[in-house]
Image: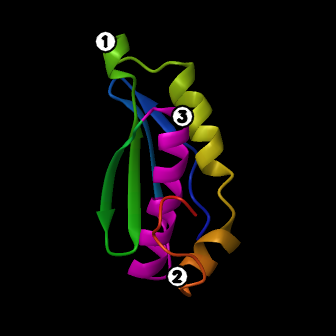
Amino acid sequence: MKDALPWAEDGAGLHKTFVFDDFKAAIGFTVEVARLAEDADHHPDIDLRWNKVTLTLVTHSAGNKITEKDRSLADRIDKIPAETVALRTQGVFTLDWTA
């Protein structure tokens, strides 16, 4: 995972684009985001473009406003270790949600 800029905030939510070496790494990261989102019961909008993943966080149930749920999930996403993404792309992890 290449260095990403900080989360941008506007009236539509928190936004951040993460850039990876290839598609497999981007998918690996997206799977890790999905795991965190499920744990938090808070799901980002995800736009995946080959080696780039753009996330948008906003709480729809709060009238499409940024809440602590968004900030908390953003912090957790920022802590996804690059090693986890690398292992996933090498097939060390599967896409089994129970893993």
Residue 79 relative to residue 16: left or right: right
Instruction: Name the kind of residue labelled 3 in the image.
Output: Ala
Q: Which residue is mark 3?
A: 40
What residue lies at 63% left-to-right and 50% top-to-bottom? 78
Q: Nearer the viewer, residue 10 or 81?
A: 81
Q: Which residue is mark 1?
A: 63
The location of residue 26, given as percent across then percent down, is: 44, 71
The location of residue 27, given as percent across then percent down, is: 42, 70
Which is in the foreground here, disc 2 or disc 1? 2
**Gap between marks 2 and 1, in whole Å?**
37 Å
**Gap between marks 2 and 3, in whole Å?**
24 Å
Q: Which residue is mark 2?
A: 89
- Look at the image and tell me in which quarter the N terminus lies: bottom right
Q: Earlier in the sequence, mark 2 or mark 3?
A: 3
Instruction: Name the kind of residue labelled 1 in the image.
Output: Gly
Q: Nearer the viewer, residue 53 or 6?
A: 53
Q: Earlier in the sequence, mark 3 or mark 1?
A: 3
Residue 21 relative to residue 13: left or right: right
Residue stretch rendered in magenta on the structure: 18-42
Residue 93 relative to residue 63: left or right: right
Residue 53 occupies which quadrant of the picture?
bottom left
